[in-house]
Image (cartoon, grey):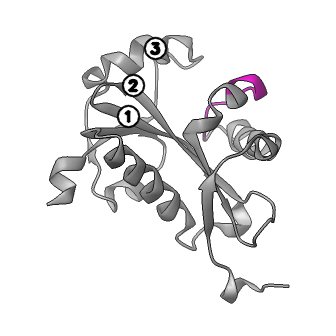
């Protein structure tokens, strides 16, 4: 058995067998009002956009993060969640960095997030923006949100061209 001091992140693309656990993790945080809930069908449909965190090879999913493509030069970090027992170890940062690397490989210029934890993303170089800067997101997803139009999340953006220099 690995103890906490020896725990290390194994980050990989999600596979179908991960989705039920991902669903439980995301909906645990959704029930606390920290994330939007995701249905199983939505998670399976968007399987390819998620990466998962495990702390032992072949072990259970301990965290998840998604990279949704919104437009030709715009992607979104979404559904970042780490089990409470694994928070504070840098795993969230590793998941986001993995998604940012994928965005760079896809030649996307900007990545945004809507979050209740802006300080986490500020440390990664994201800057606060007005939600009106995200018309693709608003028309594609926000209209379906139960909190629309009174969204209380903070919109943040990272320019990948700037952060690479």
- Find out whether residue 29 is within the magenta segment: no
In the picture, the disc for residue 70 is 2
Residue 80 location in percent, x, y? Answer: 56, 48
Q: Do the residues labelled 3 and 2 touch (CB within 8 Å)?
A: yes
**Is 14 in front, or is 143?**
14
Asked if residue 148 shows in the view, the reply is yes
Residue at image coords 70%, 62%: 84
Q: Which of marks 3 and 1 is nearer the N terminus?
A: 1
Q: Where is residue 117 in the image (x, y as percent from the top left)?
A: 47, 50
Q: Nearer the viewer, residue 134 or 6?
A: 6
In the foreground, 28 or 100: 100
Q: Is residue 160 above or below residue 58?
A: above
Quadrant of image for the N terminus: bottom right
State how far apart marks 3 and 1 are (Cα): 13 Å
Q: In the rendered image of this protein, does residue 121 appear above or below residue 128?
A: below
Q: Residue 144 carries which label?
A: none
Is residue 38 visible in this depiction of the protein? no
Q: Quadrant of residue 44?
A: top right
Residue sitting at 75 percent across and 23 percent down?
Answer: 41
Circles 3 and 1: CB atoms closer than 8 Å: no
Instruction: Please tell me which residue is depicted at 81% across the width and 65% down the height of the picture.
Output: 59
Neighbor class of circle 3 (other Cα within 10 Å; few <14, some 14-19, many 20+) is: few
Q: Residues within 10 Å of mark 1 (few under 14, many from 20)?
A: many
Residue assigned mark 3 = 140
Q: Quadrant of residue 8?
A: bottom right
Question: Which circle's residue, 3 or 2, is located before the other in the chain?
Answer: 2
Height in image: 87 above or below 110? below
84 on left or right of 79: right
Which residue lies under the disc numbered 1? 75
What's drawn in magenta, residue-wise?
Answer: 35-42
- In the image, 3: left or right of 93? right
* Foreground residue among 48 and 118: 48
């Amino acid at each position: 058995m690995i103890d906490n001091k020896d725990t290390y992140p194994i980050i990989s693309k999600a596979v179908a067998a991960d989705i039920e656990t991902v669903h439980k993790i995301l909906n645990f945080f959704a029930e606390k009002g920290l994330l939007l809930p995701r249905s199983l069908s939505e998670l399976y449909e968007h399987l390819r956009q998620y990466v998962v965190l495990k702390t032992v090879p072949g072990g259970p999913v301990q965290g998840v993060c998604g990279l949704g493509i919104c437009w030709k030069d715009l992607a979104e970090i979404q559904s970042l969640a780490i089990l409470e027992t694994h928070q504070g170890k840098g795993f969230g940062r590793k998941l986001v960095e993995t998604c940012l690397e994928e965005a760079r490989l896809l030649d996307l210029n900007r990545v945004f997030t809507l979050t209740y934890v802006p300080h986490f993303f500020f440390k990664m170089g994201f800057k606060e923006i007005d939600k009106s800067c995200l018309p693709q997101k608003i028309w594609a997803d926000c209209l379906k949100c139960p909190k629309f139009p009174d969204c209380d999340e903070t919109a943040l953006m990272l320019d990948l061209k700037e952060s690479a220099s």
